[in-house]
């Protein structure tokens, strides 16, 4: 059996620095889902509208990551921004939201990769094989385990994969766009692409269809704090991490929006692609315009891109589990915070992530509506977890900027990011079809409510008795050691856990 240790990532700083992630490699952890989720036909307008929000939100996050670069991410920043008496409760809420969003995000990427692979198989068999949710669940489970094995290796292996991935991703987008435009026999005109609105939701007025398009775009451009979760394994994270977040956002937005425009020009009849037996509208667009061979090639390319996305997302989520366990936020924390001496990776945290991502997708065996709601929660929960420390920064005046800072614009950028998040959160919880039935209801609000209730009950019954916030705040608050920290020291054998290196 492989020996494990409860060594923290801070103590492994020298090994981590020898690996030296480059800024390009870190961009993959922040924005690599451009090609995946443009299935919503209003995504093009949604992408344009979200330009007024996402860059500002990501700039706000980058600013916080520069000031506090730890693998705990924005959850840790609460300990620096909130008043001492609120640190534990606010960190608890923010931590659970962030973890929920990340796990749901990984699960959705794995399910999407499986669905695209099955669509390619269907095309290869000339339609004799028809994909199903049950098959997608089985394939995603296999993919999730495979990605868990890769994340169990030394981090340098992922660095090698992601270095070549960035080039492959951009090359795929460019060649796919050229091929679609060149081979499409009957392109829509610019008037249709940029002005036509075909409301399919049943809601009135048609502006609701426009608003619902935000969800697709928000999901694609979320989890942009992922780079923060490997900050303790990066040289000069206070500079590289925020730039990686911001550059990844720019690349994702520009290329994603342009690719969505290409798809809209070449999609043909939207009703036809939505009714496709492939259940993947974008892959159906490939097939309609490029034929069998072309569709399979670009479907496989999309599948490979999503695999890389899943691998880096699991890496980020595992580091989050490690950081939360270091602070005793999760049940069984003494297990999940252990670091393998041979690979310098938190193996138990990796497989904690793998288990829950695969388990969540099992819900699709019973109800695709429910699993879709969980996927929706990804964008909502992550955006809320980002806004909590941003609000603390604005209200309490405890922020000390790092080298990446927006200066006088900071407050107004932060304010707009928070207000827009509040607005779109309401939209994301709306049922996307009318009239609303049990079959088309958006159950995201139920999932969110269940998580709040579960984490709240855990807090009342147990968490408030031992949890005092992120590790650096657990030792001393305003110069006086707390009774909770004394209890923790007693449980840990008389000494507090070592702080993480920043």
Image (cartoon, rainbow, N blue to C red):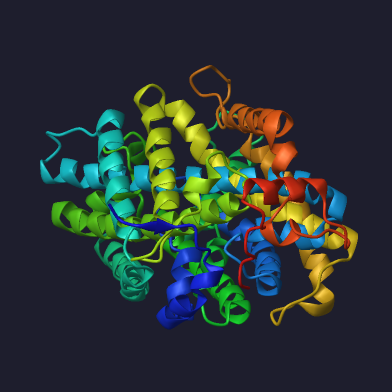
Query: For this rendering, which residue is in front, 37 or 207?
Result: 37
Foreground: 273 or 80? 80
> Quick check: 108 left or right of 181?
right
Left/right placement of residue 207 relative to residue 278 reads: right
Query: How many labels were placed on the picture?
Result: 0
Residue 200 visible? The answer is no
Front residue of 289/30: it is 30
Horizontal and vertical percent for residue 52? 68, 62
Is residue 71 among what the camera can see? Answer: yes
Question: Quick one: which residue is furthest to the top in this view?
Answer: 438
Q: Position of residue 147 (x, y in %)?
A: 31, 53
The answer to which quarter of the image holds residue 97 is: top right
Q: Quadrant of residue 404?
A: bottom right
> Compared to 325, does 394 lie above or below?
below
Q: Residue at x 26, y 35 (%)?
A: 138
User: Residue 79, percent across and down?
Assistant: 76, 58
Q: Give the left or right position of residue 194, taking residue 130 as reference.
A: right
State the residue lying farthest toward the front: 494
Quadrant placement of the C terminus: bottom right
Q: Residue at x 44, y 77 (%)?
A: 15
Is 165 located above or below residue 353 in the figure?
below
From the viewer's perspective, is residue 238 above or below residue 398? below
Q: Give coordinates of residue 70: x percent, y percent.
A: 61, 67
Residue drawn 30% across and 65% down? 176
132 vs 478, nearest the viewer: 478
């Amino acid at each position: 059996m492989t020996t494990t240790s409860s060594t923290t990532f801070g103590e492994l700083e020298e090994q981590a620095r020898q690996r030296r992630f480059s800024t390009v490699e870190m961009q993959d952890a922040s924005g690599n889902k451009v090609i995946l989720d443009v299935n919503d036909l209003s995504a093009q307008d949604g992408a344009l509208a979200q330009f007024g929000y996402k860059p500002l939100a990501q700039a706000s996050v980058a600013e916080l990551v520069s000031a506090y670069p730890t693998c705990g991410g924005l959850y840790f920043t609460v300990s620096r921004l909130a008043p001492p008496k609120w640190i534990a409760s606010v960190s608890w809420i923010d931590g659970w939201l962030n973890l929920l969003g990340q796990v749901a995000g990984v699960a959705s990427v794995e399910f999407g990769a499986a669905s695209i692979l099955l669509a390619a198989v269907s095309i290869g068999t000339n339609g004799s094989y028809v994909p199903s949710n049950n098959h997608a669940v089985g394939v995603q489970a296999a993919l999730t385990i495979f990605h868990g094995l890769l994340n169990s290796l030394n981090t340098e292996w992922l660095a090698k994969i992601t270095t070549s991935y960035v080039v492959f991703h951009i090359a795929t987008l460019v060649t796919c766009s050229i091929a679609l435009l060149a081979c499409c026999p009957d392109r829509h005109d610019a008037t249709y692409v940029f002005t036509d609105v075909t409301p399919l939701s049943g809601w009135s007025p048609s502006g609701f269809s426009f608003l619902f398009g935000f969800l697709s775009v928000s999901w694609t451009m979320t989890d942009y704090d992922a780079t923060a979760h490997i900050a303790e394994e990066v040289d000069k994270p206070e500079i590289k991490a925020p730039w990686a977040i911001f550059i990844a956002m720019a690349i994702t937005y520009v290329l994603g929006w342009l690719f969505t425009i290409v798809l809209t020009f070449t999609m043909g009849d939207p009703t036809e692609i939505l009714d496709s037996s492939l259940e993947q509208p974008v892959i159906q667009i490939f097939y309609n315009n490029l034929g069998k061979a072309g569709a399979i090639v670009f479907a496989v390319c999309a599948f490979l891109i999503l695999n890389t996305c899943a691998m880096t997302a699991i890496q980020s989520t595992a580091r989050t589990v490690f950081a939360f366990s270091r602070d005793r936020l999760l049940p069984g924390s003494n297990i999940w915070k252990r670091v393998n001496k041979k690979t310098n990776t938190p193996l138990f945290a990796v497989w904690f992530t793998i288990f829950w991502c695969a388990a969540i997708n099992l819900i699709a065996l019973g109800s695709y509506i429910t699993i879709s709601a969980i996927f929706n929660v990804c964008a909502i929960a992550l955006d809320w977890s980002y806004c909590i420390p941003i609000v603390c920064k604005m209200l309490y005046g405890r922020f000390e900027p790092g080298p990446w800072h927006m200066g006088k614009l900071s407050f107004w950028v932060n304010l707009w990011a928070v207000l827009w998040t509040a607005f779109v959160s309401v939209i994301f919880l709306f049922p996307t079809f009318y009239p609303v039935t049990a079959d088309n209801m958006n159950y995201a609000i139920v999932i969110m409510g269940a998580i709040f209730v579960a984490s709240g009950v855990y807090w009342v019954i147990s968490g408030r008795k031992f949890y005092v916030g992120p590790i650096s705040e657990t030792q001393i608050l305003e110069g006086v050691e707390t009774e909770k920290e004394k209890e923790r020291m007693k449980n840990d054998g008389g000494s507090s856990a070592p702080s993480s290196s920043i």
